Amino acid sequence: MDPHLRNARTTDLPPPALDGELRFDQATREQAADDFGHLVHTEPESVLLPGSTDDVAATIRWAAKRGRTFAAQGQRHSVWGRSGARNGIVAAMSTRHSVGRAVSDRIVVGAGTTWREVLAATLPRGQTPPVLTDYLDLSVGGTLVVGGVGGTTSRYGVQSDNVISMDVVTGTGQTITCSAQSHSDLFDAVRAGLGQVGVITEATLELVAAPEQVRRFVLVYPNLAGMLKDARLLSAGAGFDAVQGAILAAPTGELSFQLDVAKFFTGSPPDDDVLLAGLSDDPAGRMPGTIAYVDYLERLAGLEAALRGNGQWFHPHPWITTFIGDSHVESLVDDELGRLDPATDLGKFGQIVLSPIRTGAITSPLLRTPSEGLCFAFNFVRVPTTADLGDANRLVDSNRAVYDRVRNAGGALYPVSAVPMSPEDWRRHFGSAFHRLDEAKRGFDPDHVLTPGYDVFEGVSRR
Ligand SMILES: Cc1cc2nc3c(=O)[nH]c(=O)nc-3n(C[C@H](O)[C@H](O)[C@H](O)COP(=O)(O)OP(=O)(O)OC[C@H]3O[C@@H](n4cnc5c(N)ncnc54)[C@H](O)[C@@H]3O)c2cc1C
């Protein structure tokens, strides 16, 4: 829609009748203006607490008629204002957190349900979603629209590859149930489609048998080359279920290189010698352990508690996540490490994630990864020691420079990052898949009502 026309739309239409409620008070709007990044603030005109899918549909139609934008908010764990809608309407999807009964290999959940809540319903039945994010307090809807990467992605793809069907409200306020068989154009534009064509209200998720226990090792390497060599070996084999890497800095600035590897099992434990055969880590540094599956899934809880305790959990989070192809990973990461000042660029509790991902299992068409069979998630998890916005914005600028170097090396951005992106940047990002999203946008959200926070399409910006 022409931005000038948008302002000319009538703004005095009364709100629709709702099962839930629409809040206009300052405190609610201010809270909805912020996210986990604390870097971008976009205050909405009002906040919908939807009581039903019909509420979402009616409010989107109301927003469209008034020339306003609309964005769903899951857990607001975006780090760059992507769930915001300046002067528009945001929907607190946490009110839509129903969990149905798991039937056979699937479960139906409200899109505002967190993965922790999903697990609480499935684990007692001995089932689990095949892919879980490292952090469980994210909403189903919020991760399905970005992809949702976890330790088992090499085997099962991303979370949006493991959704069977979704109820989606489009930008014209129509409710459509979509799947690979029915309305597949909508299904494929919603999965990892950054909320551009629809708001998910309900999802049917695939389930697999949950293991009872996990045999876990932390493997330590003296350098990047050694870590990458074993990451390649481990990701090519079927031994471990999850292989995740990290580069950590000691207070002296010295870097250490680690792989955190996990083998899931029920019953007899696996043979360690078979699992670890041929690896070149320092065997003396291995930290083996056997833990319950649920404890493995909670592996970030200790770090979260520490950061909540020292206040850093509430500081700005200028994080960046990218995917870099195997053929460029070593030279690119080496170069980035040469540019890094760990104390100021990562902070004491920060780290660089470097995890191998086999791309063959990823099927969501809009999730962009390098065109190589093996890529690496390459993330700067920056944990600033102060809440200083100037410093955080310096790191956002640095993110943009990292992204440009990753892209020039054939890599891709994971759009959950604190990286400013223009419509032109997004067009380049989606590349050959852009036409799919563009076509779906024209069909399902022709007035550009939905999810302005990414600035994917030209038109009304949230800023
Ligand atoms: C501590 C932490 C750990 C993380 N770990 C991982 C990880 O292991 N793997 C991984 O892949 N990512 C991870 N992320 C990134 C995270 O997956 C994304 O930021 C995700 O979008 C956040 O989900 P949310 O529920 O908070 O969504 P929000 O931040 O509320 O929203 C994110 C985007 O999704 C849209 N949206 C939300 N709900 C819906 C819906 N129902 N329908 C349509 N659009 C919707 C919003 O409008 C917004 O554009 C992590 C983030 C944090 C802060």
Image: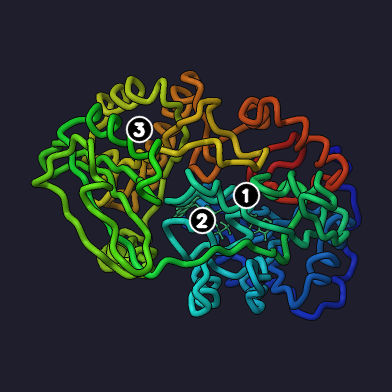
Q: Residue 357, can we see it?
A: yes
Residue 253 falls in which quadrant of the image?
top left
Please state the quadrant of the image where ligand 1 appears.
Answer: bottom right
Q: Residue at x 72, y 66 (%)?
A: 202
Q: How is the image coloured?
A: rainbow
Mark 3 vs mark 2, CA separation in Å: 21 Å
In the image, residue 39 above or below residue 109: above
Question: Which labelled disc corresponds to residue 131?
Answer: 2
Q: Is residue 425 left or right of residue 64?
A: left
Give the x, y percent position of residue 446.
86, 43
Marks 1/2 in contact by CB < 8 Å: the verdict is yes
The three-letter code of the residue at mark 3 reads: Arg
Give the x, y percent position of residue 411.
49, 27
First-in-chain label (3 vs 2): 2
Question: Which labelled disc corresponds to residue 232?
Answer: 3
Quarter containing the C terminus: top right
> For mark 1, what is the residue?
161
Q: Residue at x 69, y 47 (%)?
A: 452
- Front residue of 107 and 199: 107
Quarter containing the N terminus: top right
Mark 3 vs mark 1, CA separation in Å: 23 Å
Secondary structure type for disc 3: helix
